[in-house]
Amino acid sequence: MKKNNALTQARALTLPSREASLKREASVSHFWNSNRKLLEDAWAEWEIENKDDILIPDETLLDPRLREAINEAWENPEKENAVADLWEEIIPGVYSAQFFDLDRLAEFRNYLEAVSNSQIPKRAPYGIQLNRYGIMLDPRSEGHLAAPNFQKFYTDIMNRFMRPIARLLLGTYGYDNQTFGFSIQYNPDKDRDLYAHTDASAATLNININLPDEEFTGSQVDFHDKTTGKTVQTIFKPGKAIIHRGNVPHATHPIISGQRSNLVVWLYGDRMQIPRGNTSSYGSFDNTTHKIDMQETITARQRWSIPSALKDTFAPF
């Protein structure tokens, strides 16, 4: 009998139950770890099988102004202020900008829909209150989205975009070698909200992937300004991203109608190290003077560089 290919074998697997996953039973990790190579091969076969029908995600999906500023800064880091100018400060340590190109966002959503319909086992982000309906994105995570083209896109987002932006706006240099990511959905009938919390990250980039005609009500995000004691409320708009220090308290209001879909990616240091104490552990970016106030001076060239250390295997959940 002809041996089944990886895609067929992967689709025939029986996933651990939600209850077992929430309890973090040993059998769950064993399932994902023992099938890791099979699932990676299945995703590669899935891409080949659908090469004429699915998108190859790349940075052209992103906002043209952001791409242009980023690419110019990589060529000449002294031009990094053009990147900073695209980000609006919400409160200290929290910034917002257009991230995805609205004209291309539907293509990316169609790609994610194809991923969802692939019938390849995927692990949801168990371990936090919400996101039982999302997907793990980072290779350090069990059951992650291992499609090779997606992983190249994800790596480019982290290395070429998020890390230098976080260093520029938040001063995360030295605490950003490692990456983590997952997708989320807020839906009135599923995961509705998220209580006030901080992230186990040096920096969090939260990107909305709703299409312009996908409206929702509720699901506002509160950010607490520890310097003033005030809370600022913001609403995600299609293709927009919010980048913030992980230690900024934030919460999501219940969604009332519609659905909100986001990609969430984190940066932190080796062995999950993050800055401790108050915000002075970070840099402070001033949009007027375009200067970085840090405990030690980091050059523009250092900000626009990729860490040489290998990825470790530590994951927050």
Image: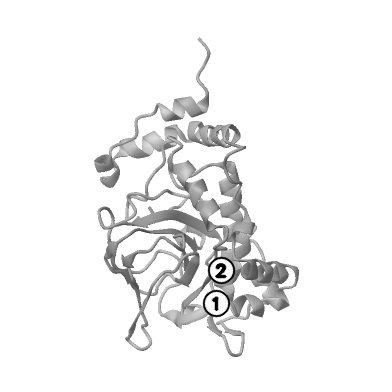
Which residue does the numbered mark 1 point to in the structure image?
Answer: 87
> Residue 219 at what x, y percent from top left?
32, 67
Q: Which residue is at the front of the view, 225 or 26?
A: 225
Tag 2's secondary structure? loop
Residue at 57 percent of width and 61 percent of height: 103
Which residue does the numbered mark 2 point to in the structure image?
Answer: 174
Say the numbered circle drawn on residue 48. none
> Residue 179 at what x, y percent from top left?
51, 57
Q: Which residue is at the front of the view, 292 or 253?
A: 253
User: Is 293 left, or right, of 20 in this rendering?
Assistant: right
Amino acid at the residue labelled 1: Trp
> Residue 236 at what x, y percent from top left?
41, 69
Q: Is residue 23 visible?
A: yes
Q: Quadrant of residue 101?
A: bottom right
User: Vertically, is 186 above or below 289?
Assistant: above
Tag 1's secondary structure? loop
User: Vertically, is 225 above or below 268?
Assistant: below
> Residue 309 at what x, y percent from top left?
61, 56
Characterize the local packing of mark 1: few (<14), some (14-19) or many (20 or more) Cα atoms within 10 angstroms. many
Q: Is residue 92 visible?
A: no
User: Is 47 left, or right, of 20 in this rendering?
Assistant: right
| Farthest right residue in view | 75
Q: Quadrant of residue 161?
A: bottom right
Residue at 46 percent of width and 45 percent of height: 113
Amino acid at the residue labelled 2: Gly
